[in-house]
Image: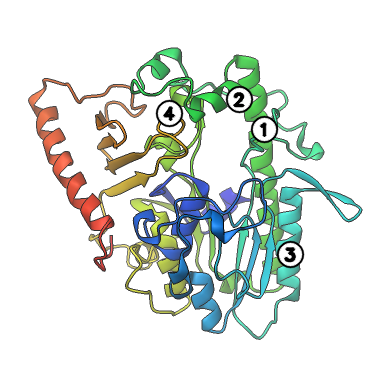
Amino acid sequence: ILDALAANGVRFTHNCVTTSVCWISRATLYTGQYMSRHKTTKPCCWSGSPKIRGKLDHVPENWSELSFYELLKQNGYYVGHAGKWGIHLPFDKNIDFNVEDDGWHYRTIGEKLWHITEKNEADALRFLATRPKDKPFFLNVAFFATHAKDSDVRQYMPQESSMELYKDDTIPIPPTATQEAWERMPYFFTDKNEGRTRWGVRFSNYTLHQTMMKNYYRMATEVDAACGAILEELRRQDALDNTVVIFTTDNGNFHAEHGLADKWYPHQESIRVPLIIHDPRMADSVKGTTNDEFTLNIDLAPTILRAAGIPVPDKMHGRDISELYLSPDRTDWRNEFFYEHPIVSSKNYVPASEALVRKDYKYMYWPNFRYEQLFDLNEDPGEMNDLLQSMNPEHKTKLEEMRKRFTELKKIVKSDELITL
């Protein structure tokens, strides 16, 4: 289904997140801002437990003027959410349809045993069936899959009907899923690191890796099928050709690359995420193409608002992605971006990380340890060979230039300056 969506839209090959963890990335998606501005550095809760304001270091009171949910609602849209929020929401009572499901794969509700993807799909279809037909609408179907159930040793639990999928396939092992790659990580990556702990649960031997990845792909295929049901309902309502459809996610994942599991860090596996946009405004010549520009999760809120004809607040950092396919000859798009992630629990558990990301080079900085790295992504796409100590004059020049630009972008992101990045 998603392949068909891309065939009738544009797929963005260098779409990235500015912070690779669910709660911060979602706050960024909703507000069009970097973490440093929206300041949501903690989740609302774990395992779908109730949201308690007192548990947060910072409650984002300004979201009512920034969230696209609020702005769409204020401008006459019927607004809905089905699935994972992941964060405390000061505006969660101000939308028309709100069903939150987070942190589980199977749950009995009433007399029915639900799988969470099945539930997300049913809620989305209920929204579409009951929405007023005389109002424009917005719906975020926030699938929990393919997120693991971290507290369960099985991690990924697909629906029973999917268990024959990929049964006879062999899932390739990533080239950097090696002991050497793990040993090349910075010295402070030890067995206490949460990424390494989760690697042990999911990928520490070949059989386990095959089991985990097959179940992961089964859950991804279930999301694909749910998207098909939702798109079919839009088509049945004769609404698909008048609806912008966006498919994306909140963070990438290590699947044993560098001896890690999950996200957090500035490596390619963690920061790159899918983005497909189907937009009725697209020319036929654009449909089915790919775009290689850097698009970011800060861009989603401005893109949604502009599609609805709503002015983009000055405090948003992002850009309207539609300019890339409605004005394809434009040349003034970003060619780099700043990445940030806070410490989680302790510097041994998930250390803070920052980066300057380009298509050819990446500069990483680990602030808890004042540790730098430099990678040539053209020659070393797996980010195995740190060039920080290289004696090559070209590398030395590149390092100095990227250090300087990193500092400049970091200062801008952390300031109150009203600027589009």
144 sits left or right of 394 in the view: right
180 sits left or right of 377 in the view: right
In the picture shown, does residue 51 fall above or below 183? Answer: below
Whichever of callouts 3 and 4 sits on the residue coming sooner in the sequence is 3
Q: Residue at x 40, y 68 (%)?
A: 302
Identify the colour scheme used: rainbow
What element does badge 2 sit on? helix
Residue type pointed to by label 4? Asn
Q: Which residue is mark 4?
A: 348
Residue 385 at x, y percent in the picture: 28, 21
Q: Among all residues in the image, which is located at the extreme right? A: 111
Residue type pointed to by label 3? Leu
Which one is in front in this view, the residue at disc 2 or the one at disc 4? 4
In whole angstroms, how far apart are the C-alphas of marks 2 and 4?
A: 20 Å
The 10 Å Cα crowd at callout 2, few under 14, some 14 to 19, many 20 or more, is: many
What element does badge 4 sit on? loop
Q: Quadrant of the C terminus?
A: bottom left
Residue type pointed to by label 2? Arg
Q: Residue at x 75, y 75 (%)?
A: 130
321 sits left or right of 209 in the view: left
Which one is in front in this view, the residue at disc 1 or the one at disc 3? 1
Q: Which residue is mark 3?
A: 125
In the picture shown, does residue 15 fall above or below 78? Answer: above
Q: Quadrant for residue 325, please give it.
A: bottom left
Q: Is residue 190 visible?
A: yes
Whichever of callouts 2 and 3 sits on the residue coming sooner in the sequence is 3
Q: Which residue is mark 2?
A: 202
What element does badge 3 sit on? helix
